[in-house]
Each structure stands twice: as C-alpha cells, then as structure tokens.
Image (cartoon, rainbow, N blue to C red):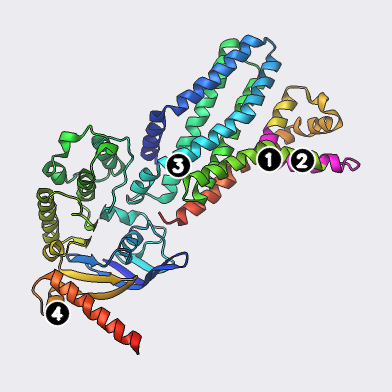
Amino acid sequence: MTRVIRYIFNDILRTRFILFYTGFLLLSTFALFQLDSDFGKIVLSLLNIVLMVVPLVSVVFTTIHFFSSYEFIELMLAQPINRRVIFLSEYLAVASSLCMAYLIGVGVPFIMFGAGQNVISLLVTGVFLTLVFVSLAFLSSVLTRDKSKAIGIALLFWFYFSLIYDGFVLWIIYSFNDYPLEKVTLTLIAFNPVDLARIIMLLQLDISALMGYTGAFYKNFFGSNMGVLFSSSILFLWAIIPIYIALRIFSKKDL
Amino acid sequence: MILINNLCKKFGKLTVLDQVNLSLIAGKSYALVGPNGSGKTTLIKGVLGMVRPSSGLIQFNGKDIANEWKYREQIGYMPQIGRYPENMRIGELIDMMKNIRKEVKTVDEELIDAFKLYKIYDKRMHTLSGGTRQKVSASLAFLFHAPVLILDEPTAGLDPVSVEILKEKILYERRMGKLIIITSHILSDLDELSTEMVYIFEGKIQYNNSIDALKEETHETRLNKAVTTLIKQKELLNSITEQI
C-alpha cells in the first residue's frame, strides 16, 4: 500500500497545483497579519476564507486528480493488488497532500507570529473540512464515468453545503420562529459539515454573544466537553461515510 | 487452470457475454477469435477481475476469483490499448511495475532488450507512437514470468521485425508450458501461435476445439480459410433456422 501511495504522491506533486494552493494560503494569511494585529479578528477573517476555499479546492482538485489518474488505476487493477487498497491509497494520498498544504499555508504564519489556542482549532477544523470534501468528491467521481459530470456533482455538493443549505435553515428558523427551535437547528447543523465547522470556530472566538439566545444555547452545548466530542465525531462521520460508500461502489465497478 | 462457468455480462440492456462456458488448460495456447464487439475483451477483463460478471462463475486454479486479487500474480496481461500515466517516462514506468511486484526477484527483460526500449527510457509516455506503446505493453506482460499470459491483439500496430520478435517470445513461452490466450484478427499469426481455437459471436461461444480439428472439419490447410468457412457455415445455418 505504501508503494502505491508513494507513486500517487509523486504524481500529485508533479502537477504543482498543491504548491499553488499552499502559496495562496500563505499569502492570504500573511496579508491578514499585515492588515490587523488582533488575533481574534485575524482568525475570524481567515475562517471566512477557509470555509469557502478549502471545500472548493478539495472538491475540484480531487475530481480532476481522480480522472487524470484513471490510467494509473487501470494499470494497477491488472496487477496483484486489492481494489480497495488502490482506492484507499488514492484517498489517503490526495487527502494528506491537501491537508499538508493547508497546515503549512495557514500554520506557518501563525508559528512565525505566535499562535493561540484558537489557531489550533482553526487548523483542526480545516483539516476536517478537507477530509470531508475529499470524500464527497471521491463519491461523485465513482458515481459517473464522465469527468465533467463528476466535477458538476462535486461542485453541487460544495454549492449545497456552502450556500443553499444555509438559506434552507434560515427559512425554517424564520417561518417557525414562534416555536423553540434550538434542538431542531442543532440537528440541522449536524447535517452540514460547513456549518458545523463554522459554529465550532465561532464559539471558540467568544463572539457567540452576538448570536443571541440561540448562541447562548450553542455555547452551552458546544462549549462543554460533550459538545466538542459530539461535533468532531459528526464531522468524522461526514468524512467516513461518503468514502465508505464510494469504496463499495468502486469495488463493484467495471473498469 | 481457468474455468468459466455460465458467465453472463450485461451493460445495461446490452448483453455482451451470454452463457459462456470455457475451460482453459495450462500448456495450451488459445486463439480467441470473433468480430469486433463480440465480447472478447470483456471476457478477458472478466478473467482479470476488471469487469464484474452479471452472473456466472470464473475460477482460477479451482478458486472463485470474485473479490480475489492474489491470483493476478500469475497473470501477465497485455491490453489492447495500453493506457499508462501520461507524464511518466518509460524507465520510470518499468521501475514502478517492478517495485510494485517486489516479491518477484528475477524479472524477464528479454523483450525490453529485444525491442531496444532501454534506448528510449527517458521518453515520456504521451510522446510515444502506438507501436512503441505496444512494445512497452508487451514487455510489461512478460516481465514477471507469469504462468498465464493474456495478450489482447498483441501484434496490432507493431512493425514486421517486432512482430517476429514477439511471436518468437510467445512460442518460446508456449514451449515452456504456459497457458496463453491471444485475441487477434490476424489469423495467419494465430495459425503459428495457437493450438486451440475459441470462436465468439455476439457473446456466445460458437466453436471451441483444436485448430487441427477445425482444419480437418472444414477441409482447409490454412487457418484463415478454415475460419471463413466456419463463419459461412454458421451463417448458412442461422439463415436456415431463421427461415424455419
């Protein structure tokens, strides 16, 4: 397995996309440090970038990579290697290179300027988001044989979780605001990895007071150890379930 | 060595393989013949586990190959269209294959030498012509001394000198007692390379016997004549049954 991963890794590095991604993250983090000196504000601004950019880059890069390494996959399938091993190697190589790019791009400036506790949770949520969207992109790649269709489905995931879902939740809260909705929204948030990541970070940044009564309720829930455990295990499930389904499909697929 | 039992494969509504029964024995060389789209490549991909059968069973040395992968150690496969990572160099590709099958200690580089591939080791795969690609595919198929060789149109696109080199190699491996499966449309090649003949038409096996028996049945001395006679006979038979 490690041999296969090494070759995929080399292939990824050769495209230089990962380097551009790291460079972009480095540049924006440094730029934010130049603009502001308040740590909390920097993390908050970064959070907004991270929540949009990380899922988008993960989704697009993964689908393009999967289809451009189709030949490699075909070649490996004729060799005495388990299909699952090939697929999981692809996942691990893509996910780890994207995570590394993120950790370097966002982490290095913070190490240079001195880091706080918020930064660690920003890094962890970013890594989680990468894992989640890489698995969603792998799922969309095995669902179809057509590259453009796969990218379309993957972008739809991103679009849905970043924009549409929020509108849906807002609509529910607005329409039913006569009822106590705390638990309902809490459940709804669990169905969106981006929201989950955002809430975790916002609560860490101590600006939950801005969110009123619901904010206080979340603070009460997510602030506790149980809440942290709950939210990270839900995010973990978001990474595991799509890749598991994708693996099932891939191991039965005709190639 | 390979046993195929009632194999069916459907792609949507299209039936590509229909109740295929075949038993392939070590030491023999099989010619897999049939018109384009008759299911030859699908059958081969089924044996390799790249295509999952809709129903039926494929056994390799008495073991069902569904969800198995270890048995592929014993197969050398040369695809019809060799698809390789495009920005890899030939040398890197060959090194990678060796590296992935590290447990094979001695490799057979005879074809790499004979095709003089080491001279173009630093050429990238996307710059290669179709024929050179075929040479790379052939070299990789023979690299690991696999006891089963599956060659999908091995001589298509090769220059006459390389065709002879490859044929010599196939004949040598046949004499070494390997199981060889060749698909090709060049029947004169198959006449030299194979001992058995499997004729597939529209996903069904129409004929399965030794080439000598086929020649005798059709009263022909050359395989291409014999096969055309066989096809004509089948067509005649079909038209008669259709009329009834």
Q: Is residue A205 magenta?
A: no
As measured in the structure, the alpha-carbon distance from the residue carrying label 2 to the one carrying label 1 is: 10 Å
The residue beneath circle 3 is A66
Going from N to C along the chain, the mark reached first, 3 or 1, is 3
* Rendered residue at 22%/32% (across/down): B122
Residue at point 30%, 71% (across, down)? B201
Front: mark 2 or 1: 2
- Report in which chain the residue with disc 3 lies: A
In this rendering, the answer to whether B165 lies above or below B184 is above
Q: Nearer the viewer, mark 4 or mark 3?
A: 4
> Which residue does the numbered mark 4 point to in the structure image?
B218
Residue identifier under label 2: A169
Q: Amino acid at mark 1?
A: Asn
Task: Evaluate whether label 2 is on the same chain as label 3.
Answer: yes
Label 1 element class: loop
* Main secondary structure type of the part rendered in magenta: helix
Q: Of the two numbered discs 2 and 3 on the same chain, state the one appearing first in sequence.
A: 3
Marks 4 and 1, how far apart in space? 70 Å
Q: CA distance from mark 2 to mark 3?
A: 33 Å
* Pointer 2 local density, CA inside 10 Å: few below 14, some 14–19, many at least 20: some
**x%, y% of residue B176?**
13, 59
Query: Mark 2 to mark 4: distance in Å?
Result: 76 Å
Q: Are marks 4 and 1 in contact (CB under 8 Å)?
A: no
Q: Label 3 crowding class (10 Å Cα cut-off): few <14, some 14-19, many 20+?
A: many
- For the record, the magenta segment spans A173-197
Dot 1, how many residues are within 10 Å of its Cα: few (below 14), some (14-19), or many (20+)? Answer: some
Does dot 4 land on a helix, a strand or a loop? helix
Q: Which residue is mark 1?
A: A192
Residues at marks 2 and 4 touching, judged by CB atoms closer than 8 Å? no
Q: Residue furthest bottom?
A: B244
Chain to which mark 1 belongs:
A
